[in-house]
Amino acid sequence: VIGTTGFVVAGQAGNNGLLRSKRPLPTPFTTPLPIPQVKRPARVQGGVEYYTLAQQARDVEILPGVRTRIWGYDGTFPGPTFHLRQGRQAVVELRNELEVPTSMHLHGGVTPPESDGYPTDLVNPVGKKEYTYPMQQRAATLWYHDHRMDFTAPQVWRGLAGMCLVTDTEEENLGLPADKYDVPLLLTDRAFDEDGSFLYPSLHHGPGVEKEYANGVLGDVILVNGAPWPVLEVDATRYRFRIVNGSNARRYELALEPAADLVQIGSDAGLLDKPRKHPSLTVTPGERFDVVVDFHDCPVGTEITLTNRLDGPVMRFKVVRQGPKSAPVPDKLVDIEKLDNPVVTRTFDFRTTTKHHGARMWTINGELFDAAKSLADPKLGTVEKWRISSDFHHPVHLHLAHFQVLSRGAGGPDARDAGWKDTVDVRPYEVVEVLARFDGYRGRYMMHCHNLEHEDMAMMANFFVG
Ligand code: C2O
Ligand code: CU
């Protein structure tokens, strides 16, 4: 039991990597949910939006009355939310004002390789880099985060993550909840030291440490948009919530209490063909779920908790006033082309090893990440079937390529696997098949486990689109 909250945020199955905060924690549901600033372009020229973004260290108040040093985009955690539009190119000039190298990846972005945030494509301290996002992609909930080789996990833990919402005309015509009724929810877990700083183990301190944190680092405080167990005051109307699991390793099985459906309208890389109701939704690191929650019938004063069934509460909604009557979610959302006719089937096995100097590392097809190697060479514009197997929970993410889940084990996809995905939850000893289309650009891209500690412990591989 931690602090004064009276509930336990536990470790998770097979995971002993829980860090416990060394200071009292706030009463849940007292901090208002912060909404990250919307990023405005510095200028628009020839139809291209130019942005500048700075990575900065700042002392911010996360726990009441306490200062926490973060590393944030524009000095905030989460970073500002980008609102981009299909067909309108965005150029982001990133300035690194931190003391460490960084690399920025737009997760879910269909991005030329030189702007993809490859782990060794570093922006050194006081340096800058221009990232070009052509935005030839459908409306979707994307997010951006640090991707530095070997240090992604600690750098994201310190705050280098933000959201990027892509819109298009097809989405706009659906009349979905918008503006203040369209709320990003970036879920992360953290732990705090006595002085208020973030706790994070040094994973590079050799044998032993990496065993304790073999399955990733968990914190005992759940932050939504950077605030601990926040509360959002809502109108009695429909809301759209863009749920992003930005946690290093924590899984969530999200549900509302008292029970109500989460109506999913989108997945990682776009809207669904039709809405799908879920009593609960499992969300693994890197995944996004775009959901609508209807508070119309909730009397003023109603409190609804968003909870993680695997351990404890996440945040609360409090209905404080009547709201506008809003249109129900349309029965039909967008057309989704069903991928088929893969030109090749490839297999990828995600597995642990201790073969490397006795330290526990994570491999794909028996290989530790090697920047000079490639495990696949898909042809531009083709569809491939990738069979992914694993020995643990691995949220498997592909850069560039969006995919559709074809099967899990002997069965079809789960209800939560619908739509265009870029990250898929592969559970222990499960085989998941996806159909991926390698559209967009030629060049070097990567796949990796989005458990960020696994990623840093070498569970990544290149593929070359040719
Ligand atoms: Cu969000 Cu390569 O990752
Ligand atoms: Cu993993």
Image: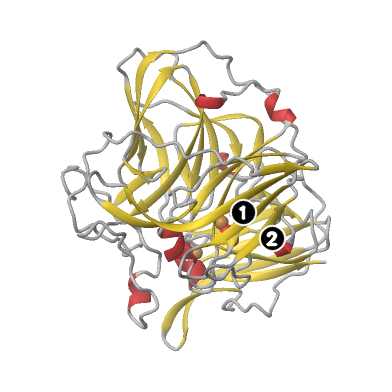
The residue drawn where x is 61% and y is 64% is 128
Find out whether the residues at labels 2 and 1 contact each other: C-beta distance under 8 Å: yes
Q: Residues within 10 Å of mark 2 (few under 14, many from 20)?
A: many
Q: Is residue 104 above or below residue 251?
A: below
Q: Residues within 10 Å of mark 1 (few under 14, many from 20)?
A: many
Q: Where residue 209 appears, x then y in whole percent?
A: 33, 76
Question: Which is more toward the observer, 314 or 420?
Answer: 314
Residue 28, numbered label: none
Residue 426 visible in the current orientation = no
Q: Where residue 388 appears, x then y in whole percent?
A: 61, 62
The residue drawn where x is 22% and y is 45% is 65
The residue drawn where x is 33% and y is 65% is 200
Q: Secondary structure at mark 1?
A: strand
**Numbered label tally:** 2
Q: Would residue 374 be found to the left or right of residue 3 on screen?
A: right
The verdict on label 2 being within 8 Å of ligand 1 is no
Question: Which is more toward the observer, 200 or 14?
Answer: 200
Name the residue that disc number 2 marks. 115
Q: Would residue 143 be found to the left or right of residue 420 on screen?
A: left
Q: Would residue 394 be found to the left or right of residue 213 on screen?
A: right
The residue drawn where x is 30% and y is 50% is 221
Name the residue that disc number 1 marks. 106
Q: Where residue 26 appears, x then y in whole percent?
A: 22, 43
Residue 27 visible in the current orientation = yes
Report which quarter residue 315 is drawn in: top left
Q: State the separation of the CA atoms marked 2 and 1.
A: 9 Å
Q: Amino acid at mark 2?
A: Ser
Q: Where residue 10 appears, x then y in whole percent?
A: 28, 53
Question: Which is more toward the observer, 134 or 224?
Answer: 134
